[in-house]
Amino acid sequence: LGQSVLLMASAGAGVVPSEDAISITYLDIKGLAEPVRLALTVGGVAFEDRRVGYDEVARLRAAGELPFGQVPILQHKGRTYAQSGSLLRTAMVPQWYGNALPRSPVTGQFYPGSSLSPEQRTAVAEALNTEMLPTRFAQLEAFATTCGGPYVCGAMSIADLDLYGVVCGIAAGTYCAGVTPAVLDACPRLREAASLVGAHPRVVAWNAQHPA
């Protein structure tokens, strides 16, 4: 999904003709779709920002309209693109869902027997805050310092937009329950890149219109 959006955003700014309309479907939160929304916004590409509830996600899943049973999806020229990946998300699945596994891609329900006890969730949060996330962010920080520019890859890319959503969410305590902002303490370059994305005029305008 990220590569598809990056190609669309870099192909040329301006309003997309109606027959080529782009639609992003996701929950009414920033979450996993925000880097995609921002990539199109920064690139000047018009799109339909379709925000749905869990009942509508269930309906779309049952209708076979979600290729992997999950949102976000991007629809363009009759094709549906799905999934947006991140090195960090897999590690946070147990803490996000309170389960060892994410929701079933078929039913949207959690698997029987996969729920974590309160003690297990506490142990997961401890591992995320003390080792897993500080280590992963440190690896990204080390990579970013080799790129020579103010952004993660030198110039603004989908990686920075993705990072922006993660960093802002962690700082606000809304990205993943139990994950503390301290996991980014040793990553000034990543925080700077996220700050630069947040200061981009089109991102500022977008956030003013979509504060949630």
Image (cartoon, grey):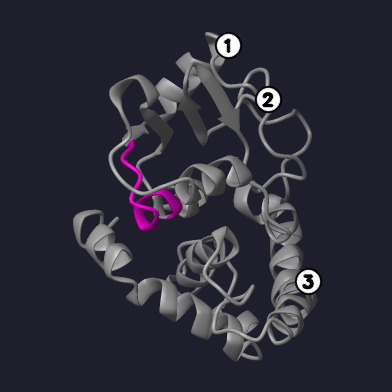
Instruction: Tell me: residue 43, above or below residue 198.
Output: above
Give how far across and how far down residue 166 sits, in percent: 54, 65
Q: Is residue 80 left or right of residue 94?
A: left
Residue that numbered label 1 is attached to:
64
Given this view, does label 1 or label 2 mark the residue nearer the observer?
Answer: 1
Q: Which residue is mark 3?
A: 132
Q: In which image quadrant can residue 46 be found?
A: top left
- Label 1: element kind: loop
Q: Amino acid at mark 3?
A: Met
Q: Residues within 10 Å of mark 3 (few under 14, many from 20)?
A: some
Residue 77, image x, y percentages: 47, 20
Task: Identify whether 147 is placed above or below 12.
Answer: below
Which residue is painted at 27% across and 61% down in the image? 207
Q: Amino acid at mark 2?
A: Pro
Q: Is residue 176 visible?
A: no
Q: Nearer the observer, disc 1 or disc 3?
A: 1
Q: Earlier in the sequence, mark 1 or mark 2?
A: 1
**In front: 49, or 113?**
49
For the image, the number of numbered tags is 3
Disc number for residue 105: 2
Please identify the residue farthest to the front as the structure is shown: 12
The crowding category of the residue bearing disc 2, from other C-alpha atoms within 10 Å (few below 14, some 14 to 19, many at least 20), is some
The answer to the question of whether label 1 and label 2 lie on touching residues, with beta carbons closer than 8 A, is: no
Q: Residue at x 36, y 27 (%)?
A: 21
Q: Look at the image and say whether residue 149 sits in the magenta stretch.
A: no
Is 97 in front, or is 105?
105
Q: Amino acid at mark 1?
A: Gly
Residue segment shown in magenta: 39-47
Residue 151: image quadrant is bottom right
Picture coordinates of residue 102, whole percent (x, y):
69, 39
The quadrant the N terminus occupies is top right
